[in-house]
Image (cartoon, helix red, strand yellow):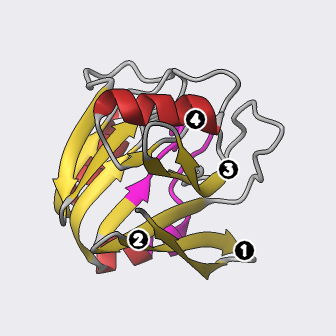
Amino acid sequence: MLLLIGDFHIPDRASHVPRPIKERVESREYKLILCTGDLTGEDILEWLQSLKGSVKVVEGNMDYLSLPTHEVVEYRGLAVGLIHGHQVYPRGDTAKLGAIADSLGVQVLVTGHTHFPQIETVKTASIHAILNPGSATGCWGGDPRATGIPSFMEAEVEGKLIHISLLEVREGSLVERRFKLKLD
């Protein structure tokens, strides 16, 4: 299983990872943890590295840590790209994110920066899944579409089908919504 998480902004805009998120991710074992950046503190990087799973983290526009700008990994036969998302203006523009997916040669692009969850497909040279887990702390991020609701995603790949769970902290508890994307 994949964990998709990012946009923490700790300690700059938020003080901690919400308890329901922390408890969930610490109790699970992930094959791969993909973090979209904007940790803003070394403590969050250390926390991610303490979780059960291989960790990939990219640099966000607010990070001052030595991190790569992008990553490309293979997961269950799919090429998965990871960026922060500040490379795209306007924020979250799916056509531009699709062009980045084309340039990276990936079928799935995990991105952040907008602080709101995004699950969709885009057709450019091929069909790509665009996945944005939102902000793990729900902190302010400058995009008017941001919900202020802490969120992250878990995903599993089954051939060309991606099963996605969007988990949000609502009234102190995790609420899960499930989605499926098919890549052809």
First in residue order: circle 1 vs circle 3: 3
Magenta-drawn stretch, dominant element (helix, strand or loop)? loop
Tell me the residue at 48%/29% (across/down). Answer: 99
Q: Is residue 5 magenta?
A: yes
Q: Residue 54's quadrant in the figure?
A: bottom left
Q: Which residue is mark 2?
A: 162
Quarter of the image with the C terminus in it: bottom left
Q: Which residue is mark 1?
A: 170
Q: Position of residue 33 (x, y in %)?
A: 28, 57
First in residue order: circle 2 vs circle 1: 2
Circle 1 or circle 3, nearest the eye:
3
Q: Are marks 4 and 1 in contact (CB under 8 Å)?
A: no
Circle 2 or circle 1, nearest the eye:
2
Q: Which residue is mark 4?
A: 113
Marks 4 and 2, how far apart at CA: 22 Å
Q: Are marks 3 and 4 in contact (CB under 8 Å)?
A: no
> SS for tag 4?
loop
> SS for tag 3?
loop
Circle 2 or circle 3, nearest the eye:
2
Q: Residue 83's quadrant in the figure?
A: top left
From the viewer's perspective, is 155 left or right of 166? left
Other-residue count near label 2 (Cα within 10 Å), few / some / many at <14 / 14–19 / ≥20? some
Q: Position of residue 71 (x, y in %)?
A: 26, 35
First in residue order: circle 2 vs circle 3: 3
Q: Which residue is mark 3?
A: 116
The residue stretch that appears in magenta: 4-23
Marks 2 and 1, how far apart at CA: 25 Å
